[in-house]
Image (spheres, coloured by chain):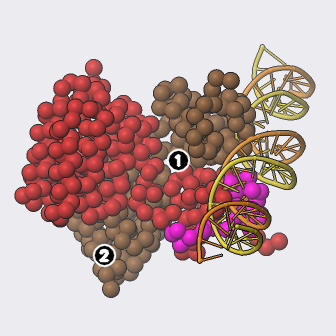
Chain colours: A red, B brown, C yellow, D orange
Amino acid sequence: MEETAPQKGTVTQRAIEQIKAMIAEGRLEPGQRLPTERDLAARLGISRSSMREAIRALTALGVLEARHGSGIYVTQLQAGDLLETFGVVADLSRGPRLVELLEIRRILESTATALAAARITPDQLGTVEKHLTAMNDTDDPEEILAHDLAFHREIALAAGNETLAAILEGLSSRTFRARVWRGYQEEGAFDRTRREHTAIHRALVTHDPEAARAAAAAHVGEVEEWLRSQLAP
Amino acid sequence: MEETAPQKGTVTQRAIEQIKAMIAEGRLEPGQRLPTERDLAARLGISRSSMREAIRALTALGVLEARHGSGIYVTQLQAGDLLETFGVVADLSRGPRLVELLEIRRILESTATALAAARITPDQLGTVEKHLTAMNDTDDPEEILAHDLAFHREIALAAGNETLAAILEGLSSRTFRARVWRGYQEEGAFDRTRREHTAIHRALVTHDPEAARAAAAAHVGEVEEWLRSQLAP
DNA sequence: ATCGTCATAGTGGTCGGACCACTCGGCTGA
DNA sequence: TCAGCCGAGTGGTCCGACCACTATGACGAT
């Protein structure tokens, strides 16, 4: 009886902290398999139910991944794994907070596009062009949205910061854009959007960071202003 | 027997989605109390155990809050509630990803400081000055760190975007800064840090957004470069 | 009548055990 | 040799019991 000293908070919360600590201290490497639920529960002196809740919480945070019949694994702890939760924020935000999120996206997207203008490779530029033309060659809103997302995703990747790309991905989650875009596009903003995308692409081709920054900021800013006006009255 | 049709994924995952949907559709308002675990489980036709895991997951994401003996409540869904998880990302990131996070912080912090320069009120400016002088009047690293955090937090708040402030808060989580700052300050960077803070403050006083942006970017960039050099060899 | 006290019902927290669904490696047999 | 089977082991689900805490209202002292 030398352990179980602290006794602070719920046992589940304690288990969460302990597993997080194991990862932070390097005792658990990314991709590594954890002991079984039953083992872990026994080690920490708690029931399997409580341990399962702890694991479920860390799974929701993108830290752990459970594979039925196989075991529990630490994720690669890549940006994408951990920042998927960012999409939840976007999905559940409404009203003024939606504008704040767009403002953040404007800041990050403009910088990412500027970085991409300086660093983008011919290959990546080709992919960007592919999505640009595909976007202009269809009238299906769903398809346009898909290529729009891919267009910006490729640019974010070209910026060379995976974490930044993951955050922007979350800020452009399907449901988020669907909610905002729907109303925006209903006002016949297709042409304007196409021009803006073309401007961004041109800046990338000429490797002009400042022009890219301005074009991207204007692009997101347009939607931002529209959304702001919708909330004003 | 008209429901329970989809049958996709685990029952817990389904429960999570359903509760999220209830909130997204407005059937559950922020701050509102949910039915009891036993009720919810019965409604969705699952066991209490599975429902508890779903609730635990949403609790970890900052969407729900459980109060022992009282009930389960939807959080205010404020930026702070949902973005607390950002701290987990910062805590578990290492190596190159740490640099990426600092790069993101540089982007956001410089913009936030620029916005603050234009919008900060005399009251807020007073608070900023308080932390600046307190930071310079002590040698206790812990106290310096605390006032350093408060200094930047106040500036972020003055920028007028709560979501942005919450993200920066997460990117400056105690453990994150403790890990990076320790090594940085050991190299006698105190004086440089003080000069940089003074420059930021001066730009705020003169309401000069461009100077503020440059000062903040340089401030974070210094640490960023130091960290990059640490990983290079 | 007022206020503090305390029993109590109801809530989330924890536990243990049972069984199901799935994975994976080794065994079996053609 | 290899395809197929099969069983041990794993996470997924369910159940029922009990504990710890909160909130409410009845009760009694003042």
Q: Position of residue A7 (x, y in %)?
A: 73, 60
Residue B111 in view: no
Left or right of residue B135: residue D17 = right
Dot 1 amino acid type: Leu
Q: Residues within 10 Å of mark 1 (few under 14, many from 20)?
A: many
Which residue is identified by label 2?
B228
Mark 1 and mark 2 on one chain:
yes
Residue extent of the magenta highlight? A29-52
**Count of numbered badges drawn on the protein:** 2
Residue A31 belongs to magenta span? yes
Which residue is identified by label 1?
B61
Disc 1: which chain? Answer: B
Query: Which residue occupies 61% across, 52% down?
Result: A56
Disc 2: which chain? Answer: B
Location of the C terminus of chain A (image quadrant): top left
Q: Position of residue A164 (x, y in %)?
A: 32, 57
Query: Which residue occupies 17% across, 57% down?
Result: A126
Dot 2 amino acid type: Arg
- Ranked by sequence position, the earlier of labels 1 and 2 is 1
Q: Residue furthest left?
A: A206
Q: Nearer the viewer, residue C15 or A200?
A: A200
Location of the N terminus of chain A (image quadrant): bottom right
In the image, residue B59 sits, relative to residue A29, either above or below, namely above
Q: Position of residue A68 (x, y in %)?
A: 63, 56
**Mark 2, secondary structure of its residue:** helix
Left or right of residue B50: residue A164 = left
In whole angstroms, how far apart are the C-alphas of marks 1 and 2?
31 Å
